[in-house]
Amino acid sequence: MGKTHRTGLVAKSRRRLANSIVFGLCVFLCFYWFGKKAVDYLTVGSEEAYLSRDWLTHEFETYVRLKAVAANDYASIEAFRTERALRQIVVQRHGRILLYAGERGGLFRSGDYEEFSMKPSVEVRFADGPAEVYFGNGDNPALSIGISFLAAILAMLAGIGYFSGAMREDVECIRKLQKEVAVISRGDYDGRVTVEGKDEIAQLARDLDRMRADLKEHREKEAELRDAEKKLVLGMSHDLRTPLTALITYLEIAKRQEDSGANYLGKAVSKAQEIRVLSEEMFEHFLISSVSEKRALAEESAEAAFSDDLSEICAVLAEKGFLVRARGIEQLKGVVLVDHEYLGRIVNNLLSNFLKYADRAEEVLLSTDVREHEILIRFENAASPLVGNGRESAGIGTKNIELMMKAMGGTFAAEAAEGRYMTELHFPRIDT
């Protein structure tokens, strides 16, 4: 646990912050030192201009003559320096420094001779003989503040740049993790999540990879269960069909016998047929819902795709005694994507619902509507009076239609109100 804290994001951020502060401080000191050196070097020209003014030399020579100042008279020369607000006065004779009056209080450091020997000086006659005098103008406070300010700005920018560069590693890890999570969110569980380091980001990546593996395993088990369920239902459907077929056959034979129970046998045949229809609908439902891969759809004109099937519905219903009124079939236009196998099953489901639940005494209205982005096919009919007396549908047929329409990119809607039933098929157009 302690190792995690030492390598965690908080600890890393603290170390990076401390390093950035140290780096910024080094930049500040370097820039300030070089800046001061540059200013000292550049001010030599100003000192030359300053010394070229005769009044300073003349004023000092007058001061030396009136007070009989010797070349090594520190008190008198220091008083002149203080009165004129000069940084320093250095007196040299024959290459040797005799006196230093300035900020260091007359104390010399190693290298002072080399420093002052390179700077401009004037010859002044002292009470004890001539000597060379160097006048220092003093620091410019505004310039020093400016150098300090620029050094602080550069140090701050350098520290921020160092910290940002150090954080780029974590940002790149987060971006990579984001891309890999986006792949997983699309359902691709095969790619591994990259784990780098030992901090919280690495722990998060490790947990996400473990979650990905668990989801992949769960999906594989779920697929196996679906396959087992499919096989079970298909087996049950096949097993149901065989005895139901035999039952219907025996009941049909018994019905033909002149017996007082013929009426009950007819009802038994009807119920057995309903069981067979439900079994077939259940078989179809699991067959459609178990298809995981996307089916190939054919691109066809609306007239070619729907005219034959709609005409077939009208013909079958008319043959069964329904009054059908069709409108707009001949005006179909546009291009759609369809699966003819699914269209055939949808037609069969619709016909089955009409034959079982529609009132033959009322007309069936079939209409089409070509819209800007879709083609609508609507069926409207009155419900049979027998609906509600034991003939309600389990809804498997309509669910099958909904699944098949979804597979073709369309939608299915059904609505029942005031004894009438309306179904709508919506097919998207691809030519608009």
Image: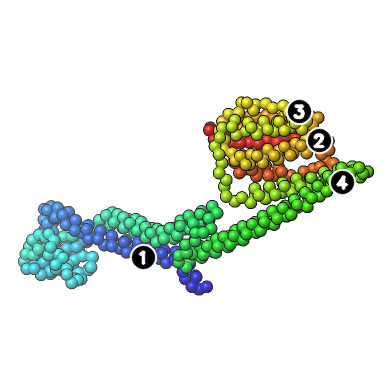
The local secondary structure at tag 3 comes to loop
Height in image: 110 above or below 294? below
Q: According to the image, label 1 marks what residue?
A: 22
- Circle 4 residues within 10 Å: few <14, some 14–19, many ≥20: some
Q: Around disc 3, counting alpha carbons within 10 Å, would you say few (fewer than 14), some (14 to 19), or many (20 or more)?
A: some
Q: Which mark is drawn over residue 384?
A: 2
Point out residue 106 in the picture as x, y percentages from the top left corner: 20, 69
First of labels 3, 1 by sequence position: 1
* Element type where label 2 sits in the image: loop
Closer to the observer: label 4 or label 2? 4
User: Which residue is rendered at x = 69% and y = 27% of the image?
Assistant: 326
Work out which residue is located at the far right of the displayed protein and give it: 260
Is there any visible trace of residue 156 in the rendered image? Answer: no
> What is the three-letter code of the residue carrying label 4?
Ala
Q: Position of residue 47 (x, y in %)?
A: 16, 56
Whether 270 is drawn above or below 231: the answer is above
Three-letter amino acid code of the residue under disc 2: Ser
The one of 310 and 14 positioned closer to us in this rendering: 310
User: What amino acid is labelled 1 in the image?
Assistant: Val
Mark closest to the chain's N terminus, 3 or 4: 4
Q: Mark 2 or 1 closer to N-term?
A: 1
